[in-house]
Structure formats: C-alpha cells, structure tokens
Amino acid sequence: MNSKCLDQEVNRTKEAEVGEALPNPESLAPMLVEIICERAHCVIYEYAIVTVKFVADEFKGRVKVKPVVRRGSKKNVDRYLELCRMNGQHLSVPAILMGGKLVFTYVPGIEDLRRAMEENLQETGVSKRIKDNLWQVGGSELTDSADAAVYLIWFGDKAALVDSGCGQGHLRLRKHIDECLPPGVQLEYLLLTHCHFDHAGGAAAVRMALGCRIVAHELDAVYLEAGDSEVTAASWYGARLEPLMVDIKLHGHESTLTIGDGSVTAIHWPGHSPGSVVYTTNIHGQLVLFGQDVHGPIHPALLSDEKHYQASLAKLIDLEADILLEGHYGIFWTKEEVREFIQSFMK
C-alpha cells in the first residue's frame, strides 16, 4: 500500500489514527554499486572503496556501496559467482558494477565515476535483474507511479508473477515480461500477496493477456470477487475495482505451488489485510522472501489488525530469509538487512 494514498485517505476521512511513523512513499531502493576485491584491507580495496563512496555520497542516499570480496566469506564468494553469471564473464579485480551490471574493470576518475552513476540512475522503465531467474518488472519507477513492485520468477518452462500493480502500466509490464522470458516459457501463475489495488488492480488484464491463473488467499479473495473498492483501497486511488474471480484460493497457513522445475511456498501473513500472504522460494541455496507490504500500514478501512500484524512480523523474523523483496521499500540483500528492516516495525 502506497503511503501517499494512506495520508490522503486519513486527511479525507479523519476516521482514525494510523500510527506514529508511516513509511515514506518516496523511499525507493538505492542503486547498488558493488566493488569486486581480491581480499579485504588491501591497497586496491581501500582506494576503490574510498573513491566510490566519495562520489556516492553526492547522491544523498540514492546509491549504496558494497564490496564483494571474492576470497572472503561464502556469502561473498556466492555473490561474486552470481555476478559473473549475470554478466557472462569472469570478473577481474577491481571491477565496479552498478545494479549488477559491469561498468568498470578499473577504478576510474571522479568525473567518470560520477557520470556513470548518473547514467545508471536514469535508466528507469527497464526491468531489473535480481538473480539469474528473478526480475523486478513493475513498480513506481518501471510501470506506473501508483504501482507496488512486481516481481517475475522463472523455473524451467514455467514462470510466475508476484502481484500485478494497479493496471495503468499494463503495456509496460507486458513489455518487461516479454523481455525477460525466453520463447516457450509460460506464465503459469499470478501470485497476489493481498487484495489492495496497487498490488492487484492489474490482475484481470494480466490473466487476459497471458492466460495465467490468479492465486490469492481466501480471506482476501472475497473482497476481490465482490469488487469492494473500499477494502481493496481502489477508492484511495480514485479508481473502481471490477469484480475479479480468483482461480486458486489459498486456505490455512501454508501452501506450496509447483512452478516448472521449482516451487514457491505461500504463507498466510495476516495483519495488513485479513488474507495477506508472503511467498518464499529457494534460489542457489538462498531463501528469497516476497514480502510486499512488510511495512504495513495498519488502517481500519483495510480491515487491518495490529495484533495479527505484530505476530506476523515475528513469523517473518523466524524465516531467516536471505533476501527480502518488498513492495515499496525495494530489495534487502542480506539476512542482517532483512532482519533489521522487519524489526523496525515491531513493537
């Protein structure tokens, strides 16, 4: 749920207190700049880090700098090998990557580095590759300003989409999906995390265009099928939700869906909405968590429940996910970052 819409609704209705610290709707995931180093605390390492951080600081939080030590911990080695696969080559030292893409094989001068950061930050409207078989294909920067993040995952000859956005950027979403999936791969499922319009408003268009089946928890499916524009918050966006039939209704706490030669687990995660769901999958030994509205918010018009929400946050901590894909706050790349982000909303 986009917090800007929440603020507008609070001002309009004056119905309830929403809480002290709502997420900033303008918070976007910073561009990740990674520096390949041979080992920690060598001269090349120190020089590269200092130079890149010096320029990154000019972008006021829009750039995040992270070293990848290829002879370091297992996590560093795994990330190094993944970046090599993504770029189709052995990455030398020192290499500088922006958004996972190789940009420099040396430490450039300040001006060249600044120009490269500016150019890569301006590359909006393009799908973002996260892992070999995982992309972000929609979101406020990619498809429509009202959209929550939309993620695409591919296993063998099948794929699944996590959420659909509000639908206004459907053609751009289709374009990004087509760019990512090779010929012959079928989009089998649209996995809805919950019923809110910025996540589910475009579901009907996706199903009509791509022939996938829509999946949602039964406790949220009822509001989608009724076309309830209040509980789904469509009215907060000045829109009306048409009744949406859900093909597969999830029941209970946990379900597993087979997708090609892989699988995704759906976990009921109530609080933000009655039928909120998170999805998990394992990629190269890492647990990836699709937790679209971990941040909430909690609001009576959404039938939110603070007690359930806090209990659900504790469940997420227990998952010990390696990577979190959030709907409005971007991507968290380590267990430590995931844990800290979730804990920041716990009371």
Image (cartoon, rainbow, N blue to C red):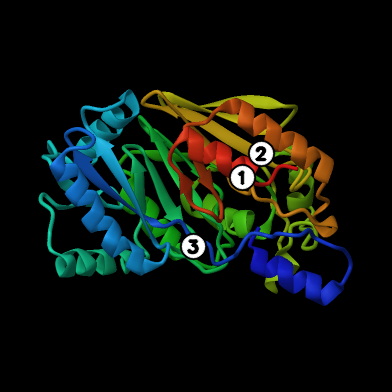
Q: Nearer the viewer, mark 2 or mark 3?
A: 2
Quick one: label 2, few (<14), some, or many (20+) residues within 10 Å? many
Judge from the rendering whether residue 99 lies leftward or rightward of residue 51; answer left or right. Answer: right
Q: Is residue 207 above or below residue 279?
A: below
Label 1: which residue? 192
Q: Which residue is found at the position 11% from the left and 49% from the top?
A: 105
Q: Given the current orientation, which residue lies at the most extreme bottom position?
A: 12
Judge from the rendering whether residue 327 lies leftward or rightward of residue 151; answer left or right. Answer: right
Quick one: label 1, few (<14), some, or many (20+) residues within 10 Å? many
Badges 3 and 1: C-beta atoms under 8 Å apart? no
Badges 1 and 2: C-beta atoms under 8 Å apart? yes
Mark 1: amino acid:
Leu
Quadrant showing the C terminus:
top right
Q: Which residue is found at the position 74% from the left and 48% from the top?
A: 272
Judge from the rendering whether residue 267 lies leftward or rightward of residue 111; answer left or right. Answer: right
Q: Mark 2 or mark 3: which comes first in sequence?
A: 3
Query: Mark number for residue 138?
Result: none
Quick one: label 3, few (<14), some, or many (20+) residues within 10 Å? many
Q: Is residue 275 above or below residue 113?
A: above
Quadrant showing the N terminus:
bottom right
Give me the C-alpha separation between circle 2 and circle 3.
23 Å
Mark 2: amino acid:
Val
Q: Nearer the viewer, mark 1 or mark 2?
A: 2
Give me the C-alpha separation between circle 3 and circle 1.
16 Å
Label 3: which residue? 170
Mark 3: amino acid:
His
Label 2: which residue? 277
